[in-house]
Image: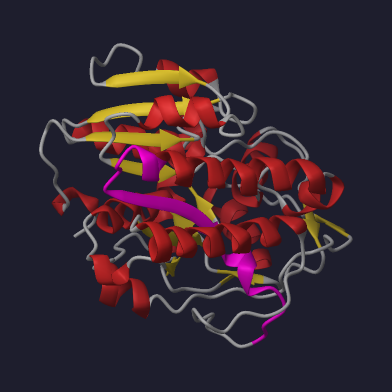
Amino acid sequence: MGYESVNFPENTVFLVTGGAGFIGSNLCEAILKKGCFVRCLDDLSTGKQANVDLFADDPHYTFIRGDVKDLDTCMKACEGVDYVLHQAAWGSVPRSIEMPLFYCANNIQGTLNMLEAARQCGVKKFVYASSSSVYGDEPVLPKQEGKEGNLLSPYAVTKRADEEWAKQYTRHYGLDTYGLRYFNVFGRRQDPEGAYAAVIPKFIRQLLQGERPTINGDGKQSRDFTYVENVIEANLRACQAPHEAAGEAFNIAYGGREYLIDIYYGLTKSLGLDTEPIFGPERAGDIRHSNADISKARRLLGYDPDWSFARGIEAAIAWYRENL
């Protein structure tokens, strides 16, 4: 069914924090297509001006350049808003190990500011990005909510802290919060540049430019790679979820399992190349295997992802071919 079947009154106002980023800009686009109003709050530290410019001529779109670390900015952004989709955060496990203080300020305090602003402004639902990293070293597959292990990085700590703060805001202040534990999201507009770029766009860019990509480790680590359309659906369905599901966190994935080495050779085949990879050292803080049980999200959010990895990777390759 996808998110096409999720509808809202045309005067509905959404605030998308981090709306100039990869996932955020896709959320803005989907909401605008439904005829609703979107406010994008982003400080452009990792988001891109180009993702703002895409919607600049739409009268339903407003861009606020601001920082979630500033409570006053969050308060102004939340005025008159029905739903908050909080995506603003810095990603990357390795970078979080290098910058723990910044990650605490940006990912934890920034989320707390948004929760408080949403509470004071009477927002109906607060949907926020969590991460599969909260499962840490728990080895059992598939990953199931309530069975988390020891956290392996500062990034994972920030996401787990966000979940706990959101739970408090539901418990004590009556704000309906819904945490979405994203599993390795990929798709159009995901940044392929830089040392901390996600693996799929990075591989595609390097292969298209005639470079030899580096695989960290032996390539036998596995992930539940999730196309961005499924994530859009999860966010919109959470906005219509019952109060009984509030204060909870949910796995958002397709429910599959792909090995990095298989993805690599699948990409070379799709691109008509025979480039061999370079194998580098494993990355500190990385989870070895990740695969999601999405039954809780199906049951409580009505989440029903219809973009498989195979379908998503085909769409992603086509987008990068056209846009790189």
> Residue at 34% of width from left, 65% of height from top?
246
Name of the residue lying farthest toward the left: 9
Q: Is residue 199 left or right of residue 163?
A: right
Question: The C terminus lies in which quarter of the figure?
Answer: top right
| Quarter containing the N terminus | bottom left
Q: Position of residue 270 (x, y in %)?
A: 52, 51
Q: Is residue 179 visible?
A: yes
Instruction: Give percent across and percent down for residue 227.
Output: 43, 54
Residue at image coords 53%, 62%: 163
Q: Is residue 37 left or right of residue 62?
A: left
Q: Is residue 269 magenta?
A: no
Quadrant hosting residue 201: top right
Q: Residue furthest right?
A: 281
The vertical placement of 201 against 166, above or below, is above
In the rendering, at what x and y percent does residue 244 appear? Answer: 27, 72
- Residue 137 image offset from top left, x and y in percent: 72, 78
Residue extending farthest to the bottom is 140
Residue furthest top as drawn: 57
Q: Nearer the viewer, residue 267 or 144?
A: 144
- Residue at horizontal 10 percent and vertical 39 percent from the top: 9
Q: Determine whether 58 is above or below 85 in the image.
A: above
From which residue to which does the magenta span run?
A: 118-139
Give the side of residue 218 with respect to residue 28, left or right: right
Visual colour scheme: secondary structure
Does the magenta segment cover residue 133? yes
Query: Do we see residue 187 in this rendering?
Result: no
Instruction: Answer above or below: position of 11 versus 217.
Output: above
